[in-house]
Image (cartoon, rainbow, N blue to C red):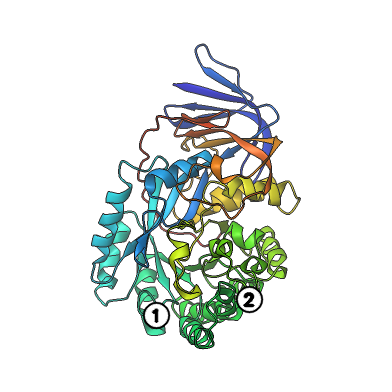
Amino acid sequence: MSVLLSGGMVTTATQSRLAAVRSTDGRIVEIGDLVPRPGEEVIDCSGCLVLPGGIETHSHLDLEAVGTVTADDFASGTRSALAGGTTTVLDFGTQFHGESLAEGLARWHDKARGQAVTDYGFHLAMTQWRPEFADEMAQIVAAGITSFKLYMAYRGSMMVEDDEIYAALSASSRLGATIGFHCENGLVIDALVREELARGHTGTFYHQRTRPPALEREAFGRLTTIAELLDAQHYIVHLSAGETIEEVRRARQRGSKVVAETCPQYLLLDDSLYGTPECDDLEARQYVMSPPLRAPENLDALWAGLADGDIQFVGTDHCSFNLKGQKDQAPDFARIPNGAPGIELRLALLYTYGVAAGRISPERFVAVTAENAARYFGLYPRKGTLLPGSDADIVVNDPKPSWTVRHDVLHDNVDHTPYEGRRIQGRVRDVFLRGHHVVADGVLAGDLAPGEFVPCGLPDSDIT
């Protein structure tokens, strides 16, 4: 089956041009001034942007945590992603205590297989470090998972010590793999939490009070010091604080092999949403995530970092828990399930508040939503760009309509969105996944074929 997308502004990370895109049998075959062929499906994209399908770098689907499980599994989470223009999801598979790395990865394959409707790959989060993992990591990399994750917070369940960070980075460096890090000083956070609870401070307001931005900056600095000893590739997930961007910039100037990811919530939402010390509003619990939302001045710093190349890609950290029945059950701020939904709105939010607002160019939009992730996680040029030979993962974005976010029109399985009431400029009109027309005129197809597992190659940190 051949499809011709004609008349649109074909936009990649390096250029925008009026052109037509032809795909056949799931691959792009031609881009240019093309004439329709007999029997070919022709879709008019006049006035629209023709973009590579988005790549989600950070999701937690069907994740067991704090005695419950996320509201979205691979079926609902990837439907939501696809409706919003994301065609590939890189989810964090997780090795739990007592499991081997292979056992943790196998469970995540079982969760996703036949359920995901986007293409998908995995990072592998390690909730502990054991010496035998150094050898196991080679098997995982050979299986197409070339990125791992470690936590510098959550003592007792996931946090690793500095010597374990060194050992893990030594192993990943030998393999050419990378490790993403949750950068917060978990020991100091625990001390701050104990102090606030001892004072009787249990409300949501104290979530952000006990996780100040300095603890992200400190943890990142400690991580990068260790990584530079080994010349190891590494990245910071969900960067939230302006002061951490300064550390990222300095590290890259020193030649550190580090890249940074942020999320829409840290670009658009601020800590005023946690309310006041006197009020424990249930609605405020929807914003409990770690790291927490920051003071308003951080937002401009993150947008600047995104535009200037100090932040290389934007994931969502989609980790959805229902406000009613999950987040509302916790007796205090320290036990509220952490996480928020966002996978469907990533492209819409970044286009509206980035491109349409003049903060980033359309080309930069493609870089941070698709191409940089494809390059870093070894999927380029199959994914993340529009080139002959690339998968026909294509988004047609119409910049003209405007609409208001309402949770009840989204496709996830959670009972709220932190972006309720936000005005959006433009809409994802059409989405193609390997040439299949999965969103047509804004409507997600009812009968979606399962997505494919896409093995990742070795990372390339030479991206901006």
Mark 1 sits on what residue? 155
Residue 162 lies, with reference to residue 266, above or below; the image says below
**Residue at 54% of width from left, 70% of height from top?**
291
Q: Is residue 455 visible?
A: yes
Question: Along the horizontal axis of the image, is 297 left or right of 181?
Answer: right
The amino acid on which the numbered mark 2 sits, given as a three-letter code, is Glu
Q: Nearer the viewer, residue 109 or 115?
A: 115
Q: Is residue 64 visible?
A: no
Q: Nearer the viewer, residue 438 or 457?
A: 438
The answer for how far apart the CA atoms under marks 1 and 2 are is 29 Å
The amino acid on which the numbered mark 1 sits, given as a three-letter code, is Arg
Q: Position of residue 29 (x, y in %)?
A: 50, 29
Q: Which disc is residue 299 wearing?
A: none
Residue 4 lies, with reference to residue 232, above or below; the image says above
Q: Position of residue 352 (x, y in %)?
A: 69, 47
Q: Position of residue 157 (x, y in %)?
A: 35, 75
Residue 244 lies, with reference to residue 161, above or below; the image says above
Q: Residue furthest top?
A: 38
Q: Residues within 10 Å of mark 2 (few under 14, many from 20)?
A: few
Mark 2 sits on what residue? 278
**Residue at 76% of width from left, 50% of height from top?**
358
Q: Position of residue 390 (x, y in %)?
A: 48, 38
Q: Are marks 1 and 2 in contact (CB under 8 Å)?
A: no
Describe the element under mark 1 as helix, strand or loop: loop
